[in-house]
Amino acid sequence: MTELLSGAAEVRVDASGSVCAVRLDGRWSTVSRIANQWLVETDWWRIPVRRHYVRLLLEGRGGGRQATGPGAVARREPTGECVELYRDLETGAWHWSRRYD
């Protein structure tokens, strides 16, 4: 099930510009992994819409457990939520899109 969200999103980005934390329900949640990202560019002939979408897996409130095994990188396994937000490439503002069950 998907819950559609709206409104401005508060995000923190790392040195490379990737989202590393989001403010959700009044608390900061660390991004465990960027599951997917894509660009949307449409309506260029009217009022252009240019957005960079990201689908994020967040660490659980308990912090998750350390990833192990061959090829594991220093990160926590996602045990929290999956959320989607986008950055308006015209204004630079971040907005909520949806939350997944």
Image: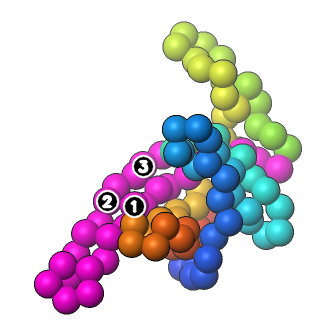
Category of crowding for the residue at label 1, using alpha-carbon neighbours closer than 10 angstroms: few (below 14), some (14–19), many (at least 20)? some
* Residue 39 marker: 2
Whether label 2 touches label 1, CB < 8 Å: yes
For image coordinates 25% across by 69% down, the residue present is: 41
User: Could you tell me which secondary element the residue under label 2 belongs to?
Assistant: strand
Q: Main secondary structure of the magenta part?
A: strand
Going from the N terminus, do you reach mark 2 or mark 1 first?
2
Q: Amino acid at mark 2?
A: Leu
Whether residue 46 can be seen here: yes
How many marks the image carries: the answer is: 3
For image coordinates 52% across by 63% down, the residue present is: 84
Q: Amino acid at mark 3?
A: Asn
Category of crowding for the residue at label 3, using alpha-carbon neighbours closer than 10 angstroms: few (below 14), some (14–19), many (at least 20)? few
**Residue 80, position as x, y percentages in the image:** 71, 51
Q: Residue furthest front?
A: 91
Q: Is residue 82 left or right of residue 30?
A: left
* Residue 96 marker: none
Q: Please report the bounds of the magenta region as a residue range.
A: 35-61
- In terms of image quadrants, where is residue 53? bottom left
The CA span between labels 1 and 3 is 11 Å
Q: Quadrant of the C terminus?
A: bottom right
- Above or below, comparing residue 71 to residue 88 in the picture: above
**Residue 85, position as x, y percentages in the image:** 52, 65
For image coordinates 49% across by 55% down, the residue present is: 55
- In terms of image quadrants, where is residue 45? bottom left
Going from the N terminus, do you reach mark 1 or mark 3 first?
3
Q: Which residue is mark 1?
A: 52
Whether residue 3 can be seen here: no
What color scheme is it?
rainbow
Q: Which residue is mark 3?
A: 36
Q: Quadrant of the N terminus?
A: bottom right
